[in-house]
Image (tube, rainbow, N blue to C red):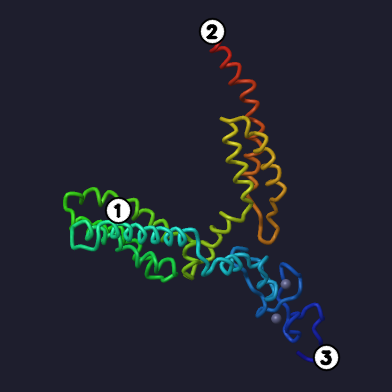
Amino acid sequence: MSLEEPLPPRGRCAVHPDLPAGGTCSRCGSFICADCATSVAGLGARLYCRACAARPDVNYLEALRQRYEGRRDGWAWVMGGVTLLLCVGVAAALARWGLRATRQSLFTGVLLLPVPVGVAFFLGQRWARHALLATPLVTAVVAGVLAPDGRFLFFLCAIPGVLTALRIHRDVRNQLFFRLPVPPGMLKVLWNERFNNPMARQASRLGFSALFMPLLAPVAVICGVVALTRVDPKALPPIGRRGQAIAGLVLGLVGPLLWWFVLLPWLSDRLHS
Ligand SMILES: [Zn+2]
Ligand SMILES: [Zn+2]
């Protein structure tokens, strides 16, 4: 740029005064150059300055990741508890029957197979996530070798174990415990579940329940109203679920009317005829 034609001050980046601004930050409004313009996952095409893009209220999905990364989720604690129970159970059985090479004590030993996987899972070792998928089947196969009569039963017992393991494997919160790279889309699903106006979801559930249990109607209405006041699509992060809040409110109002004008007269007709 030349001294003869200085750029107007409002046209320059707030951080790099020698660079022309291409736009303004969606949060603080300061001018940003192409270098500074930062998009934030989950907030569409809006651009921010770097300082704003790093704020937890703007970059809420990244804040969510940092909040949960490496921290044990419910499943990790469940696995730790089950593993502890298995160890205690096996110790009690061995104390009772003794450590002889009988079929019973061998069979008791089968229960120790999942223990290393459980311990590693609790400690956040990534291989344990995959090993967990195979553990119920492997345990069933070994148990089937020791007691061929029970083979069918063992496989039947393994099925819920495999299904639970699959569910854990796909759980986003659990993946964060294992510090796996979770894409923003999946983080948004987790955020939506836990922090996007949960009161509205509660209101719609209560509203549906109020159709069968009219005593719940006032609670549904209150939850619906509170949830509706919280809806703010322009907030950072945006708070939604307006539809569910309205559904809770409307169902909470309709439920008692339905009982009063339709169901109760119908019931009293039935009782008096
Ligand atoms: Zn800014
Ligand atoms: Zn800049």
Question: Which three-letter amino acid code belongs to the residue tagged 2?
Answer: Ser
Q: Nearer the viewer, residue 63 or 69?
A: 69
Asked whether the beta carbons under mark 2 and mark 3 sit within 8 Å of each other, the answer is no
Check if mark 2's residue and mark 1's residue have beta carbons within 8 Å: no
Indicate the position of residue 142 as horizontal and vertical percent values: 22, 60
Residue 56 position, x and y percent, is 66, 68
Report the mark closest to the observer, 2 or 1: 1
SS at badge 3: loop
- Residue at numbered disc 1: 158
What's the residue at 33%, 62% (across, down)?
114
Q: Which mark is residue 4?
A: 3
- The residue wearing badge 2 is 273
| Number of marks in picture | 3
Vertical comparison of 48 with 215: above or below: below
Label 2 CB less than 8 angstroms from ligand 1: no
Type of the residue with mark 3: Glu
Would you call the spot at circle 1 few (<14 residues within 10 Å), some (14-19), or many (20 or more)?
many
Which residue shows up at 81% across the image and 87% down it? 5
* Mark sitting earlier along the chain (2/1): 1
Quadrant assignment, res 80: bottom left
How far separated are the C-alphas under marks 3 and 1?
Answer: 81 Å
Looking at the rendered image, the disc whose residue lies closer to the viewer, 3 or 1, is 1
Q: Dot 3 surroundings within 10 Å: few (below 14), some, or many (20 or more)? A: few
